[in-house]
Amino acid sequence: MAFSVVFQTALMLALLSWRTCQSEVLAEYSPLTPEGLNISVSSALQHLHFQWTVHKLPYQELQMVFPIEISRVETSKVIWMGNYSTTVKQDQVLHWSWESELPLECAPHFVRIKSIVNDARFPELSFTSNWSSWKEVRAPTPEQNHWLIFPRNKLVEEGSNVTFCYNSARNPGLSCYVESALIDGEQLDSNLFTFTLTNIPFIRTQGTNIYCGVNHTLKDGVVLFVSKVLEEPKNFSCETQDFKTLNCTWDPGVDTGLGYNRQPSQQYTLFDSVSGKKKFCVHNNWCNWEISQDLPATFNFTLTAENYLRKRTVSTAFALTDRVHLKAPESVYFKNVSATNATVTWKVPVFRNYVTLLCQIELHDKENVRQEHNVSIKGNGEFLFSELQPDTEYVVRIRCASARHVWKWSKWAAATLVTAEAAPSKALDVWRIVKSNEGLHNVTLFWKPLSKFHANGKILFYNIVAKNLDKKSELKLLCIPAPTNGTELTLDQGSYQIQVTANNSVGPSPTSEIVISENSGNEEVEEEKINGTKDGFLVSWNPRYGDRAGHVVDWCEHPQNLHCDLQWKYLGSNTTSTVISSDAFRPGIRYNFGIYELSTDKTAYLVEKKTGYTQELAPLDSPQVAVANLTPHSFTLSWKDYDTESQRGFIQGYYVCLKSNSTECHPDSVKEGLPAYMLMHIILPMMLCVLLIAVVCYWKSQWVKEKCYPDIPDPYKSSILSLVKSKENPHLTVMNVKDCIPDAIEVINKSEGTKVQFTGKPLTESESPRPANLYLLPAEDFSGLAPCISFENFTYNESACDSGSCAHIPVPTTAPPCQLGMLASPDNSLTSLENTHTHSQGEIPAGEMNMNYVSQLASPMLGDKDSLLINPPEPVLCSEYKMQMAVPSHLASPVLSE
């Protein structure tokens, strides 16, 4: 019991002693106020750098917070408040920086600081110290400073914000400009103004100009250097070509260098974390790295780009054998070159021959890639080409890469290969033209040159052998030098087999054969017209012979030229049509096509001919016309046919226009057609008129017959016969015309009734007129007017009357000496008489004349004194006959007296 009391008393005394000791310790360290505050200024970066210490820490380290306040111009204008947290150790000097938006040269700054213990381990130490006293900070400026604008020559990145200040104490009314644009400032105190530029653009490498002045007088200016934003390197990669050196490349992006050495271009550093080596790169887009032969062939590179404002990095890791980019193959040669085969060899410059390479080989001709091959090699390479074309130029290309990992192919190495010649591989395409003349065959041979693919070399000459099939021993041999593509042969009328071969330096081509039969060149085939189009001609035919080997169609592409450029086309035995097209076809030119059937023995038989135009054109010239057999009423026109080759279309006919000198021919109006709705409007009325005329004519048929074509009097029924008393032959009942001499014809004006009498003289038998004409001749003893006129007897010329030629003929009162002649038509007679005897005293209008034939025995019309004959002459012969005359029809007596 006593022991427990003593123990409790001792414990309480110890505890009281510890608490007393602790209180003394806390009382000693309770201030913990920051001491020795030192502030430095970095004007370029606009930074304030703080230094301070905290003395007499109760423990080795404490978690503390330092509240900081910053004022500008005066202590009462706090512009920033913040906390800085850190772990503080015994006697440690603490550092902290603050960046000012406003240039530090613009105004004085004031700073104060205090501390707070914030350590969870020692909750009893949680207390806040007092503020330190205000510390004034001013940025240093040169002596005799006349600068008005800050900051000076500041460097920023594109897109940044920058605040400027200017002092107008000594320059009232000061204004500032950015690249000539006026800037409104914000007043901080009576003389201090600021303005902020946001999202600043890059203008030029020499910087952006900012200046201030009064009344356009410059007082101060600065340059703001704006840098492009440094970019991260792109497409960073490394590769080797010789296993000795790595070549690393990248895309640097934009250059961030600025003028006046304010900022150089970005710098690049290459660092390999495997070897720990570092290299500063001289160039801005590539860098070489030497490969150490004693280190593992793996790399882990970091590329760093850096300028004054920031850094950018990019990395890559790889095995050396995965980044092999070989050099182009070397020493490409050919050996064992023949017409169809060749071997190519090459070398690849590599450091380690144990590396397996994959090589790609291409064979090109002038048009396309003909062969492609992949070959795996170690060191040198070799490959055999086969199935080549003789006498052909090829280009061989080779490139290689690492077979383990195709990182990149090498560049191509190329060489030219020319194969040897071989004999031509195809027979010539041969055709012929055969003309027979005087028992001979004139044969013109044509052949098409072989293509380079089939010639297999340069063609030197052509051999031609002509064998007489009737006389086996008879041969004709010809050697035609190249590049001729045709020749002429003169052969007998028999059958011949002609063989043609093409020859180069190696040998001849397969033989081409054609057979000339005995009848070749004598075929008679009718020519048929065909119509072509701009696309060519569709030529079709009917097979003639059942046993045939094929067909041939030939034509001339330039038929108007001396060398017509004969073309031909071989077709199969079952073909009966083909389309012939050519760029040489032109409109207005006739093209002729011959169709031949080939027999099994190579004989060609002409079976059809075609001719046509792709487009027909109108003739260029009219025919050259000659006039012959000219008479008063007819003439003959003649002209030569157009030359067939010069025709621009098929001649379908000729248009002849007969006109006077004062009129024009209009062929187009004659040929012009009318539309069917217009034709009906014309044809229907015409049909109605014709029908009406037919009805009237039928109703007045007897009257029409009497007026237009009266009955011809029957001589046997004439009343004159009863008065004839022939002394020589009393039984004569028919009057002989040649024994009768016409005395006179009287033409009477219908309107005036005047009479003009014409007396005729005797006509001899040789002068007897044709039945269709009536001749009026003056009497020998007639002393009055005596015109000589020939009339066509329309009364007895039914055809003339039907054709509308029954015209009225005026008779002039005077006439030239008597001339006999036939008038082609009443119209021409009228024209001739009017032109010759105009204004004649006795001229009678044509429309008022008519004429009736009146017998000599007829009595004058009763009651018509104008119808009596005036001094009728007596006939010289046939005195039994009374005088004959012509009187108007309306005055003639319907019944003749005896």
Image (tube, rainbow, N blue to C red):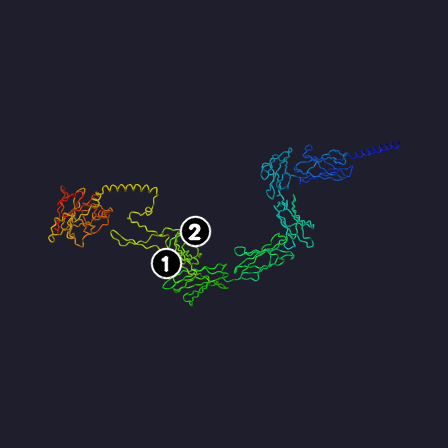
From the viewer's side, name the closer residue of 253 and 379: 379
In the image: residue 31, left or right of residue 143: right
Secondary structure under tag 2 reads: loop
> Furthest-left residue in view?
727
CB under 8 Å between discs 2 and 1: no
Which mark, by number, is residue 524? 1
Closer to us: 831 or 741: 741
Question: Which residue is tagged 2?
Answer: 535
Give residue 564's mark. none
User: In the image, what residue type sits under mark 2?
Assistant: Asp
Mark 2 or mark 1, whichever is nearer to me = 1
Which residue extends farthest bottom? 473
Residue 520 screen position, x and y as percent: 39, 61
Q: From the viewer's perspective, is residue 573 above or below residue 173? A: below
Q: Position of residue 113 (x, y in %)?
A: 72, 35
Q: Does residue 265 appear left or right of residue 39 in this picture?
A: left
Hey, which quadrant is residue 206 in on the image? top right
Secondary-structure class at tag 1: loop
Q: Is residue 863 above or below residue 246?
A: above
- On the image, the x and y values in percent for residue 230 come to 63, 44
Q: CA distance from mark 2 to mark 1?
A: 30 Å
Q: Earlier in the sequence, mark 2 or mark 1?
A: 1
Residues packed near mark 1 inside 10 Å, few (<14), some (14 to 19) or many (20 plus): few
**Residue drawn at the location 37% of the way across and 59% of the way down:** 523
Q: Amino acid at mark 1?
A: Glu
Are there few (<14), some (14-19), or many (20+) residues within 10 Å of tag 2?
A: few
The spot of residue 686 in percent (x, y) is: 29, 42
- Looking at the image, the residue that sits furthest to the right is 2
Q: Please tell me which residue lies in front, 570 or 433.
A: 570
